[in-house]
Amino acid sequence: MYLDLDLHFSDGVSQAFHSISSASSSPQVLTFSVHHAAPGFFPISEHSGLSDPSSPSFDPFVLSLPLERGASNATFARVWPIIDRVKNAFRPDYVVVQCGVDGLAGDPYATWNWSLGAGDGNLGWYIDNICRWGCKTLLLGGGEELNVELILLSVKADIEVIGGYNSPNVARAWTYFTSIAVKQSSICMRSTTLMVRMVAQLDHPLSLEADIPDHSAFPLYAPSFILDVPPGNTQDQNTAEYLQHAENVFAQITETIRDRVGTPEARA
Ligand SMILES: [Zn+2]
């Protein structure tokens, strides 16, 4: 299962796996993109709208859930059960999470209003929930200044150049995600990065109130100089009606996936 939480639609991956020719079979891969979509917003794709089971091009294993501007922790908390039910229906062995952090408050895109902490639905809460699924998990994402790798017994975090354009916040986010992922695993480190080696020695997630340590980039972390990326004041434009509609659509899709995948015995 490929789960894309980046602000932008997973156009290349979705296109690569999209198929309407195998209506009765169960593909090996399910892709699910949660993103922002609007006229003129990159990338333009025929697949970036809300998945529509009535469409001739519908593929229940290439899923799309666009969210409006200002998407907040409250909206993501409501979206989470949709993702969780899709995962339970598909029953993946492996989960690849594209976790670009350009949806965080403070990113130059200034589109969503996601935060690292501050209540259910935050991005750290998502990473924690995903790691608790118990699947072998690959976390992708990060920003242009990070290139670190963790090899964990059940969680691998490979941080590359994808999504997240406020570099201090990207570093904050991936430090926090690493501390969450490490908590979920016995680890075998293969990283040359001091930050990751230090985080891996923790036996619990970092506190979001943790001070940023003094280093050459320290001034970039002003004015808070702590780990947290709090929400901003952007109004959440995702209405209860839209989210209810999305829940209804995905309830139908989840049943389709369950029918196609079959029971554990049949799948084996
Ligand atoms: Zn992005």
Image (tube, grey):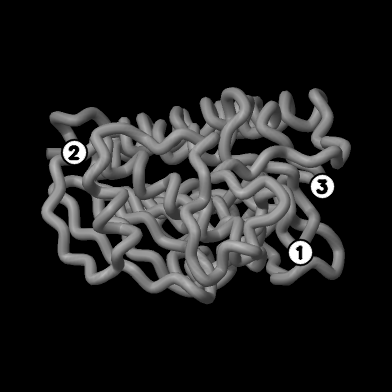
Amino acid bearing label 2: Arg
Residue 259 visible to the viewer: no
Residue depicted at x 64% and y 64%: 219
Q: Which residue lies under the disc numbered 1?
A: 108
Q: Is residue 84 visible?
A: yes
Q: At 44% across and 65% down in the image, what residue appears?
A: 17
Task: Indicate yes or no: mark 3 CB to ligand 1 under 8 Å.
Answer: no
Cα distance between the residues tagged 2 and 3: 40 Å
Between marks 2 and 3 in the image, the one whose residue lies nearer the viewer? 3
Q: CA distance from mark 1 to mark 3?
A: 14 Å
Residue 249, label in figure: none
Query: What residue does disc 3 label?
Result: 69
| Disc nearer the start of the sequence (2/3) | 3
- Mark 1 secondary-structure assignment: loop
Give coordinates of residue 10: x percent, y percent.
56, 63
Element assignment for label 3: loop
Amino acid type of the residue that numbered disc 1 sits on in the rendered structure: Pro
The residue that disc 2 covers is 267
Q: Nearer the viewer, residue 147 or 13?
A: 147
Instruction: First in sequence, mark 1 or 3: give its number.
Output: 3
